[in-house]
Image (tube, rainbow, N blue to C red):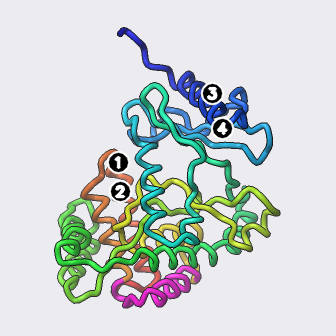
């Protein structure tokens, strides 16, 4: 009775101490440093905290995610989604999902410890070069992710996953008229499309694709040595194309021809008609709109606009 919840700094310190003990003393809690502190104008309400903790050996370096006080189960739920997605695909495909080495709870807040990976190189030219050699491997993996988890849908699922989200887009007044009109057009013909669901990451951009820590940098990228983080918004009943779309938007210039090349590779591998590419993508956006929760509406509207223009510029909208 009368106990006071730990401050964020004290909570992070306590988690680091518990993680070090749980991993047999491999971590040095005194090295704790913040990656993402609590608060901030751009942070969503359910955002997790993130800290780094050095290992006594470089291979033990860790990143720890900690739930915030208002959403104490967020990290535990994200870890559960990693395991659910992993179980829906082959072991080779699941190997790219970055799993935690330890999970737990301190002061009511769930946490997870992950091996520290390497971000892509800093600097525009170097980052672009590394992205260029890594991209084919990422696209091949996204094809495998969709193939492994492909599930054909019954009429009720088609309504929930496609009809209702497209109806929402069509009726959302802040959206541009052409976006709403396109959503209505797609809605009118979904019964004629052979639609299916697949594992969807939900926030698949270049910042969530990190390199494995061992080996020379460009060699690691060239050989496809990557893992995917941040599965908290994932679902095993999602839409194909949406993860590929957001990845390509984050890695290529607006006028680049490469995105269409990769979309065609993905589309052909899955046997999807060209006219259904944007249908999948817009339906996924409609699902987000129906379940914004803590996601700010202005950011959502901007995302819809950007994705729509991306499909338009790559020739997937009339």
**Residue at left offset 42%, top offset 55%:** 81
Mark 1–mark 4 contact, CB under 8 Å? no
Which residue does the numbered mark 3 point to in the structure image? 17
Which label is found at residue 300?
2
Q: Which residues are magenta?
A: 258-276
Query: Can you see residue 177?
Result: no
Are discs 2 and 1 less than 8 Å apart at CB? Answer: yes
Mark number displayed over residue 40? none
**Residue holding disc 4:** 23
The residue that disc 1 covers is 296
Q: Which mark lies nearer to you, 3 or 4?
A: 4
Tell me the CA gap for discs 2 and 4: 39 Å
Q: Are marks 2 and 3 in contact (CB under 8 Å)?
A: no
Distance from Cα at disc 3 to Cα at disc 4: 10 Å
10 Å neighbourhood of mark 2: few (<14), some, or many (≥20)? some
Q: What secondary structure is marked by label 4?
A: loop
């Amino acid at each position: 009775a009368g106990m006071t919840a730990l401050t964020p700094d004290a909570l992070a310190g306590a988690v680091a101490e518990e993680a070090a003990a749980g991993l047999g003393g491999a971590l040095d809690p005194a090295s704790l440093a913040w990656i993402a502190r609590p608060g901030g104008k751009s942070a969503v309400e359910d955002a997790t905290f993130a800290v780094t903790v050095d290992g006594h050996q470089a291979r033990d370096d860790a990143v720890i995610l900690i739930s915030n006080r208002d959403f104490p189960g967020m990290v535990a739920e994200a870890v559960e989604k990693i395991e659910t997605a992993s179980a829906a695909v082959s072991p080779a495909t699941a190997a790219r999902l970055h799993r935690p080495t330890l999970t737990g709870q301190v002061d009511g807040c769930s946490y997870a410890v992950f091996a520290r990976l390497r971000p892509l190189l800093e600097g525009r030219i170097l980052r672009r070069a590394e992205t260029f050699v890594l991209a084919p491997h990422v696209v091949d993996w996204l094809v495998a992710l969709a193939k492994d988890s492909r599930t054909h849908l019954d009429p009720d699922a088609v309504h929930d996953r496609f009809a209702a989200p497209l109806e929402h887009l069509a009726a959302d007044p802040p959206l541009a008229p052409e976006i709403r009109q396109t959503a209505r057009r797609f809605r009118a013909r979904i019964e004629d499309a052979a639609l299916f669901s697949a594992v969807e990451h939900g926030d698949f951009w270049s910042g969530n694709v990190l390199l494995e820590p061992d080996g020379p940098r460009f060699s690691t990228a060239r050989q496809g040595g990557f893992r995917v983080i941040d599965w908290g918004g994932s679902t095993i009943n999602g839409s194909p194309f949406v993860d590929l779309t957001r990845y390509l938007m984050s890695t290529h210039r607006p006028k680049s021809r490469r995105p269409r090349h990769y979309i065609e590779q993905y589309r052909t591998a899955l046997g999807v008609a060209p006219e259904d590419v944007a249908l999948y993508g817009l339906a996924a956006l409609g699902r987000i709109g129906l379940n914004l929760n803590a996601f700010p509406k202005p950011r959502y509207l901007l995302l819809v606009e950007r994705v729509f223009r991306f499909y338009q510029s790559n020739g997937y909208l009339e």
